Amino acid sequence: MNTSKTFVNKRKIYQFEYPADWEIFMADNTDAVVLARLPIRQPPTVQVMVADYQRTLSELLNELYTNTQSQKAGFFRLTHPREFSMSDGQPAGDFLYQNTAGEEPITHRNVIIHLTGSKFVFAYAFAPTGLWKEYEARFDAILDSIREPAAQSKQPGFWKNLLDKPKR
C-alpha cells in the first residue's frame, strides 16, 4: 500500500497531502511547487501556487476561464466554471479543459481555492488525456487536501480511504 506525505510551503500559507511515490519540485524564490509521478514519458502533474488578489473567487475563476478559452490555440473546454466548497468548507472553483495543440491531447483541471483575506491558491492538475481517468481520483484527493496548515488536522487519514481502495 502506498503512504502519503504532507507538503507545507515555505511561508506556511498552504499545505496538501500527496502520494509518497510522487516527487515535489520547488520553484526558486516562490511559493510555487510542482508535484509529479515519475518516471514516465509525460508525467501526470499537479502545480500549486499561492497569490494575493483583491478580487472575488467568481472574478478570478471567470478571468482564468476566459483567458484559457480565448488566448490558447488548440484548447477547448470540457466543463464550464463552477463554484463549490472544499471538504472543509473553503470556497473554491474549477473547470476542465483539453489541450489538443501538441502531439498528444492533455486534459487539465484548474482549481482556485480562497484561503483567508486576499490569499488564493491556484492548482493545476494535468495528464495525457489517455491517462486522465487513471489519475483523476488521486488528483481530486491532492486538490481537496489543499488548505491552510491550521485547518489540515480536520482531515485525519485523508488518503487512507483512497489508497485502500482496490484498483479497477
Image: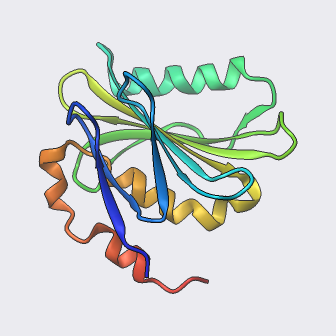
Out of 148 and 66, give the one closest to the viewer.
Answer: 148
> Taking 100 as reference, is 122 left or right?
left
Q: How many numbered badges does the structure rendering display?
A: 0
In the rendered image, the residue lying farthest to the top is 54
Q: Judge by depth and name the residue closer to the eye, 79 or 145.
A: 145
User: Quick check: 73 above or below 35?
Assistant: above
Compare residues 18 and 130 and report the one nearer the observer.
18
On-image quarter of the N terminus: bottom left
Q: Nearer the viewer, residue 92 or 152?
A: 152
> Which residue is found at the position 29% from the left and 67% from the top?
158
| Residue 80 image position (x, y, % from top left) | 58, 38
Image side of residue 48 versus residue 108, left or right: left
Q: How is the image coloured?
A: rainbow
Residue 41 image offset from top left, x and y in percent: 75, 53
Residue, far bottom: 166
Q: Residue drawn 53% across and 24% down?
A: 64
Counting from the top left corner in percent of width and height, residue 50 is at 35, 28
90 vs 104, left or right, is left
User: Which quadrant is the C terminus positioned in?
Assistant: bottom right
Q: Is residue 48 left or right of residue 81?
A: left
Corner quadrant of residue 145:
bottom left
Q: Is residue 129 above or below residue 84?
A: below
Give residue 164's quadrant in the image. bottom left
Residue lying at the far right of the rendered structure: 103
Instruction: Indicate the quadrant where residue 37 lies.
Output: bottom right
Considering only vertical position in the picture, is 61 above or below 94? above
Q: Position of residue 18 (x, y in %)?
A: 39, 58
